[in-house]
Image: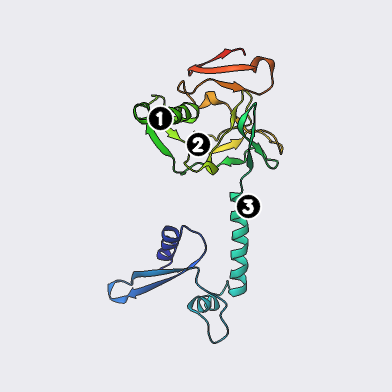
Amino acid sequence: MLDVARRSFKKMMGGIGYGRIDVRINRKRNDEVVFLEINPNCGIMYPVDQEGSADWILKLSPDLKQNEFAKLQIREALRIHDENRILYARRFDHVRGYHLRAVEDIPEGTVIFADECRPVRLCTKPYVQEHFSGVDFDDFCHSAWPIGADKHYYALWDRDPGEWRSFNHSCSPNMAFAPNRSLNVVALRLIKKGEELTMDYMQFMDDTMQPFKCFWGLPIAKGRYFLANPETLHRQTT
């Protein structure tokens, strides 16, 4: 029964909030558990003698009464909010264009983009070349991420602008993909509040990408860069 409760909570409620399951036990078939429904976020703390089923479950629980359960929900809500807070803000200027800056100090190793299991839009390059308009194709060349080394499959940015990751290139970046070829992006060092967030485009882009600027500050990096050869960074001084 506990397994049924856990699975229904995870699959049907996404593991968020709480719920009360309604089941029947078939004693004639080895105590088979028959799931009927889950009641999400059902009411608790009804007046005495008017308790709901969730109240009775909590009253009969040896370790978790109504007050403790309510406090647990508050603690979990605060924890989830803290884990999901966005550590950066989008900014724009005429030099860098759209870019990202840290809104607080970000310790080394912190996950900045939690992209494991995140849905993305996928396309093939031949499809894009045949069907995309000029503007959309230009966006593709600037921001599509190659999937694999054969230059065929690409991931596109989310349709929701609020999910866009408009970070610039740096030859000395402060972000990178986590170990084991993870899709999560982590801080390579302590990133101070207000600092621009950057990645090394050479680590994941290919020659589909159009020329881009490097703003990391050293004289050798002042110019326009090309990814014409994925193994060699070509530079044209501007």
Depth check: 27 or 100 in front? 100
Q: Quadrant of the C terminus?
A: top right
* Image point (48%, 78%), residue name: 53
Residue reaching furthest to the bottom: 49
Residue 182: give its label.
Answer: 2
Q: Circle 2 — which element?
A: loop
Q: Circle 3 — which element?
A: helix
Which residue, given by chain and number where applicable, does mark 3 sit on? 82
Residue 141 position within the rendered picture, expressed as x and y whole percent measured from the top left = 46, 26
**How many marks can you see?**
3
Q: Are marks 1 and 3 in contact (CB under 8 Å)?
A: no
Instruction: Report whether 60 appears left or right of 95.
Output: left
Q: Circle 1 — which element?
A: loop
Q: Amino acid at mark 2?
A: Ser
Q: Quadrant of residue 99?
A: top right
Instruction: Answer with mark 1 or mark 2, whichever residue precedes in sequence.
Output: 1
Q: Quadrant of residue 131?
A: top left
* Image point (53%, 17%), residue name: 226
Disc 1 from disc 3: Cα separation: 41 Å
Which residue, given by chain and number where applicable, does mark 1 sit on? 133
- Residue 179's place in the image compared with 71, above or below, is above
Q: Nearer the viewer, mark 3 or mark 2?
A: 3
Q: Residues within 10 Å of mark 1 (few under 14, many from 20)?
A: few
Instruction: Answer with mark 1 or mark 3, whichever residue precedes in sequence.
Output: 3
* Image point (61%, 12%), residue name: 237
Q: Residues within 10 Å of mark 2 (few under 14, many from 20)?
A: few
Q: Quadrant of the N terminus?
A: bottom left
Q: Nearer the viewer, mark 1 or mark 2?
A: 1
